[in-house]
């Protein structure tokens, strides 16, 4: 397993996000240290910004300075895979550069999920939804999968729809829906194919890149997370939450 951490300086809500201080260390270092707790063959920070490159080299990370023209983190990962000359079947995990509280055990679980599903091009994780508010929230991505553990669909809509529970107002019945967790493992040879495909209509409608994979007929393996991640850093409020977490004595 190889871990690649894409990190961009330009963030609309938190400019310079990877370099923001988290209890004495930049955010990108906190994410890198999370990756170090995994059994990874290599860890590479992928960035298009020399400021992030300089900071990452300063704490000893391997860095790949990539093109600034990439449309997504996956495109950036495709460039890194090519430059590392990884073999097609090697497993690459995309660890987002704003996820300092992603459990190392979950990173390894997603990689193992891909390894155990040979027909899958990529793998991801999920956890059960326990309340209707979360089910109805369009900012929460839901996933359904088949009996072999392959994704059928991802959506911002409430899927599957618990008809009887909603019809009769049974608040004790389980919802039976699952929230998608945004950590991905890929087969290295798949990523360049993905990056070459144009966005599909489903992807543009839902604003979910993984739908491009299903639309093209590729398979995504899904596992139920054995350990849930802490909050990522998307907003100023998230930043303060994560700062308090690390300031409270966590490593």
Image (spheres, rainbow, N blue to C red):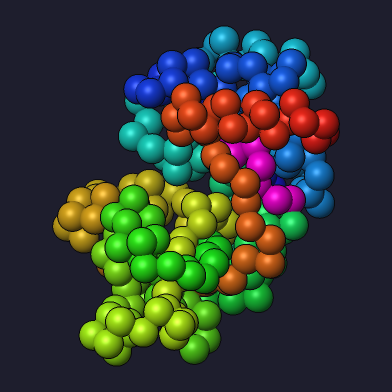
Q: Is residue 226 visible from the viewing direction of this image?
A: yes
Q: Residue at x 33, y 78 (%)?
A: 160
What secondary structure do most residues of the magenta stretch adopt? Answer: loop
Q: In this view, does 209 lie to the left or right of 147?
A: left
Q: Is residue 213 visible from the viewing direction of this image?
A: no
Q: Position of residue 25 (x, y in %)?
A: 72, 19
| Closer to us: 250 or 17 | 250
| Closer to us: 22 or 212 | 22
Q: Quadrant of residue 5?
A: top right
Q: In which quarter of the image is residue 143?
A: bottom left
| Closer to us: 151 or 17 | 17
Quarter that holds the N terminus = bottom right
Q: Which residue is drawn at 65% across and 26% down?
A: 243
Q: Quadrant of residue 215?
A: bottom left
In the rendered view, would you say 92 is above or below 98?
Answer: below
Q: Where is residue 142 in the image (x, y as percent from the top left)?
A: 38, 65
Quarter that holds the C terminus = top right
Q: In this view, does 119 lie to the left or right of 162?
A: right
Q: Residue at x 38, y 23 (%)?
A: 13
Q: In this view, does 34 lie to the left or right of 152?
A: right
| Closer to us: 5 or 170 | 170
Magenta includes 218? no
In the rendered view, would you say 82 is above or below 173?
Answer: above
Q: Residue at x 36, y 61 (%)?
A: 133
The count of marks equals 0
In the rendered view, would you say 198 is above or below 18?
Answer: below
Residue extent of the magenta highlight: 97-104
Q: Where is residue 83 in the image (x, y as percent from the top left)?
A: 58, 35
């Amino acid at each position: 397993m190889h871990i690649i951490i894409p990190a961009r300086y330009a963030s609309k809500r938190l400019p310079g996000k990877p370099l923001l201080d988290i209890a004495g260390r930049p955010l990108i270092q906190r994410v890198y240290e999370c990756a170090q707790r995994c059994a990874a063959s290599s860890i590479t920070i992928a960035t298009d910004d020399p400021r992030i490159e300089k900071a990452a080299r300063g704490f000893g990370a391997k860095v790949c300075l990539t093109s600034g023209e990439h449309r997504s983190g996956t495109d950036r990962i495709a460039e890194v895979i090519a430059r590392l000359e990884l073999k097609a079947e090697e497993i690459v995990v995309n660890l987002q550069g704003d996820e300092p509280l992603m459990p190392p055990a979950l990173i390894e679980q997603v990689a193992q999920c891909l390894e155990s599903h040979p027909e899958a091009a990529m793998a991801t994780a999920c956890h059960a939804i326990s309340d209707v508010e979360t089910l109805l929230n369009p900012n929460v991505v839901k996933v359904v999968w088949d009996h072999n553990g392959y994704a059928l669909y991802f959506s911002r809509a409430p899927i599957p729809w618990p008809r009887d529970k909603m019809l009769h107002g049974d608040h004790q019945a389980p919802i039976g829906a699952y929230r998608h967790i945004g950590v991905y493992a890929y087969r290295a040879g798949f990523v360049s194919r993905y990056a070459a495909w144009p966005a599909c209509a489903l992807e543009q409608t839902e604003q979910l890149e993984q739908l491009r994979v299903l639309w093209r007929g590729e398979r995504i393996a899904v596992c139920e997370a054995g350990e849930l991640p802490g909050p990522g850093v998307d907003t100023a409020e998230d930043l303060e939450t994560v700062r308090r977490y690390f300031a409270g004595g966590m490593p």
